[in-house]
Amino acid sequence: MKLYQLKSKQYLSISTREAWDFLSDPANLALITPEHMGFDILDGADRKMFPGQIIQYYVKPFPGYTTKWVTEITQVQQGSYFVDEQRFGPYSLWHHKHFINEIEGGVAMEDIIDYKLPFGILGQIAHPILVKKQLEQIFKYREQKLNTLFGNIPEMKNTLEFKTI
């Protein structure tokens, strides 16, 4: 079974505190998720992130398919990073690290996601056709939304890359 990795880096012209306040509030995830994903938080987003927090939501990753997704916030370093891991949902493995680093003129926001698909060879076939494209679309939407909300740093180039590990 293949393990995939997505790395995204985005530069925003806001303070570390502003970035942390926004990103550590689970309710804000709905604001930066494309509407067609049918993202609906069911439970666990009533408080700022803390280790052990369980967040439950519905998501529609593909037309005609809605699933419940349960994540746990496993690590939090106030103002710097947090990690969420899928406990139940569409992936065999989902481990998502979120980093916020202060840079001149704002912050560098970095996401590193290690993930594995179910269904063996069928999952591997679906990766380039469906899953990778969907993740690219989600992160491009998120990039645009965050730029609209907070402004980007024009001289810095945002990146999005995938690899098999």
Image (tube, helix red, strand yellow):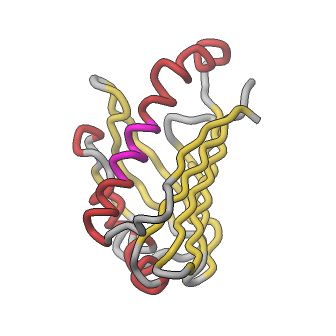
Would you say the magenta stretch is mainly helix, strand or loop? helix
Q: What residue is shown at x 45% (from left), y 29% (from top)?
A: 133
Q: Is 162 one of the magenta-colored residues?
A: no
Q: From the viewer's side, name the closer residue of 80 and 92.
A: 80
Q: Residue at x 28, y 45 (%)?
A: 34
Residue 28 placement: quadrant: bottom left
Across and down, in percent, residue 115 comes to: 63, 40
- The residue range painted magenta reads 135-142
Closest to the observer: 147 or 93?
147
Furthest residue toward front: 155
Whether residue 127 sits left or right of residue 45 in the image: it is right
Image spot of residue 153 (x, y percent): 42, 69
Q: Note whether 8 is above or below 15 in the view shown.
A: above
Q: Quadrant of the N terminus?
A: top right
The vertical placement of 130 against 151, above or below, is above
Horizontally, residue 72 falls left or right of residue 19, namely right
Q: From the top left corner, tell me how far across and down residue 89 is, in percent.
A: 50, 40
Could you say where residue 18 lies in the image, as x and y percent from the top left?
Answer: 39, 83
Q: Taking 34 as reference, is 125 above or below it?
A: above
The answer to whether residue 1 is above or below residue 92 is above
Which residue lies at the image location 55% right of the left edge and 23% below the top edge?
A: 127
Q: How many marks?
A: 0
Quarter residue 136 falls in: top left
Image side of residue 89 versus residue 35, left or right: right
Closer to us: 37 or 146:
146
Residue at 56% from the left image edge and 73% from the top image edge: 100
Q: Is residue 81 left or right of residue 18?
A: right
Image quarter (top left, top right, bottom left or bottom right) of the C terminus: top right
Nearer the observer, 61 or 51? 61
